[in-house]
Image: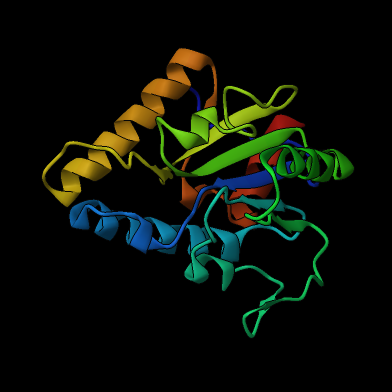
């Protein structure tokens, strides 16, 4: 049975966002609407993360959604001014191998043990990319179920797409032994309570 993720000691958690591309890369208008809502949810999540969290944005082949970049602590005036060393954004022009090496190096540099996955699509890139759920070894992996999207959903309403995405994320986590969590569980007060309950 899937358990909601528990947070360990501060400084070893990372949010890993995969392929949060501009919405123009999505042809289906229904899914595009849900995707924009998910981007906003990820923005809110980034804004409430404790300062110790490492953030990695891995966008392969396309640019990252501007609304997501605007939420990052060091994105100013449309230029990357990296005054927060815990944040890493991959360069889509780098080869796949270079991106993998840099992302893994960043996670190891900060001694990350728990990775919380977000992005699109699941199933799809969130699972199968080089830093995806099935390929990244040596970490405790969790899915932020309301921050992943099944971009190829066949549902015909926005609610159907949301349900389909959440259902598939939970089912995938259950089948593969990953934790689940929700974007509203990341604020400092909730994390503090979870950490205290773990180490009593």
* Residue at 72%, 27% in the rendered image: 139
Question: Where is 75 relative to 170, above or below?
Answer: below
* Residue at 52%, 65% in the rendered image: 68
Question: Where is 169 relative to 183, above or below?
Answer: above
Question: Where is 78 relative to 119, above or below?
Answer: below
Q: Nearer the viewer, residue 149 or 175?
A: 149
Of the 4 image quadrants, the one containing the C terminus is top right
Question: Where is 126 relative to 23, above or below?
Answer: above
Of the 4 image quadrants, the one containing the N terminus is top left
- Percent from the top left, x then y, of residue 14? 69, 45
Q: Is residue 19 visible?
A: yes
Q: Is 105 placed left or right of 144 in the picture?
A: right
Q: Is 97 placed left or right of 16 in the picture?
A: right
- Percent from the top left, x then y, of residue 170? 39, 27
* Residue at 49%, 54% in the rendered image: 20
Which quadrant holds residue 27? bottom left
* Residue at 85%, 45% in the rendered image: 110
- Percent from the top left, x then y, of residue 13? 72, 42
């Amino acid at each position: 049975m899937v358990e909601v993720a528990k947070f360990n000691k501060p400084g070893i958690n990372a949010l890993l966002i995969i392929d949060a591309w501009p919405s123009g890369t999505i042809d289906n208008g229904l899914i595009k609407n849900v995707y924009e809502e998910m981007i906003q949810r990820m923005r809110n999540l980034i804004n409430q993360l404790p300062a110790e969290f490492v953030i990695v944005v891995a966008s392969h082949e396309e640019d990252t959604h501007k609304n997501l970049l605007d939420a990052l602590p060091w994105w100013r005036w449309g230029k990357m001014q990296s005054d927060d060393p815990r944040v890493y954004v991959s360069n889509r022009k780098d080869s796949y191998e270079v991106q993998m090496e840099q992302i893994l190096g960043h996670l190891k540099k900060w001694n990350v043990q728990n990775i919380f996955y977000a992005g699109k699509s699941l199933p799809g890139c969130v699972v199968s990319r080089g830093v995806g759920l099935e390929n990244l070894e040596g970490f405790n992996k969790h899915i932020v179920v309301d921050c992943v999207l099944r971009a190829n959903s066949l549902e015909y309403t926005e609610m159907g797409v949301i349900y389909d995405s959440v259902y598939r994320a939970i089912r995938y986590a259950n089948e593969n032994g990953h934790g689940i969590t929700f974007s509203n569980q990341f604020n400092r007060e909730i994390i503090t309570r979870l950490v205290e309950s773990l180490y009593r």
